[in-house]
Image (cartoon, helix red, strand yellow):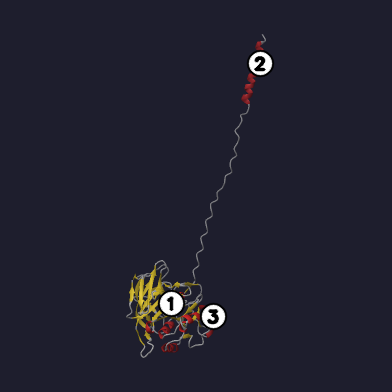
Amino acid sequence: MAIKPCLSALLLTAALAASLCACAPKEEAPQVPEEPAVSVLAPEPEPEPEPEPEPPYINPLTGEGCWEDIAQDRPVAVMLNNLKKALPQLGVSQADVIYEAPAEGGITRMLAVFQSVDGVGDIGSVRSARDYYVSLALGHDALFLHAGGSPSAYLAIKNWGAAAFDCVNGPYEGTLFWRDKERRRNMGLEHSVLTSGETISELLPTYGYRMEHKEGFSYPVQFLDEGQTAQGDPGTKVSVTFSTYKTGVFTYDPETGMYAVEEYGNPYVDGNTDGQVQVKNVLVLRTDVSNVPGDEAGRLKVRTTGTGSGLLFCDGTVQEITWSKARDSAPMTYLTPDGQPARLGVGPSYVNIVSNSAQVTVN
């Protein structure tokens, strides 16, 4: 029968088809390309800031660092008017040491001492000298600027050999000194004399005086080391009564570490900056004060040599000290009760020289 071969052929065909299907390659899933690895660089460390360079030299009057070696330069000491009518004074915020002492009639005068007058603007108003201010200036081996003086002041300048520059009885008016027109008009002739740091720097070296300290001179005041603070009883405010006319008030500001100065019931302001004067140290030195016999103007004798008691205010504290000055040409020294040098804070100082009976109130 013909049916058999046909069936066989069909079966063979089916087997071949199945075989071909079995042998056909499987379709592979499409390959997803791998993302290239991204390398993350660690941030470079920020460079350490360069430390601020420290000034290589020291101002001997304040203990502060400075960029020029000025320790052997003679300081400049300027007599200042302190009448209420003549305020504001000029240049006082840049003084390294301010001395205030009584004068006739209950008023006070000041002596502003500058180790360097570079950068100091106008200074004044300049007033007349007294012999005890000549003594204080000599204690710094300073160049002494004034406008007139008492008979005893002129005698002291002559006998003690002070390097003095006088606006009234000298050849310096119109050069080293001038009279400010506005002050002359509003305050009076006697309150109008000014000088300036620039003028002093330019002219003083031309007058033939020694510009460096005499051999062997050194300023003996010592200062606290960096990071040290003064120790003592609380002394955040002190009122110093010179007379019924003049009281100075010094108030400690812990934020600045300085004492803000007031007088006549108002902030003590530098007219160059309109800012209140601030100082690191306040000293109160007690001494003998008496009338000059036979002086019709009522001028005073104020002892600046020998020894006496005092107070030192610094960092909101107060401690007792002893001051001494061996002779008029010698500097002031300050000792603690155990005879060690009293260490002042680094910065400017304000020295009140008062009578032994003056009222000093510590809060």
Question: Is residue 180 at all visible to an observer of this figure?
Answer: no
- Residue at image position (66%, 11%) is 3
Q: Which mark is residue 9?
A: 2
What amino acid type is highlighted by mark number 3?
Answer: Glu
On-image quarter of the N terminus: top right
Mark 3 or mark 2: whose residue is earlier in sequence: 2
Which residue is disc 1 drawn over?
97
Give x and y (percent) for residue 92: 45, 76
330 shown above or below 266: below
Q: Residues within 10 Å of mark 2 (few under 14, many from 20)?
A: few
Give x and y (percent) for residue 211: 50, 82
Q: Which mark is residue 202?
A: 3
Q: CA distance from mark 3 to mark 2?
A: 131 Å
Q: Which mark is residue 230?
A: none
Q: Residues within 10 Å of mark 3 (few under 14, many from 20)?
A: few
Give x and y (percent) for residue 306: 36, 83
Mark 1 or mark 3: whose residue is earlier in sequence: 1
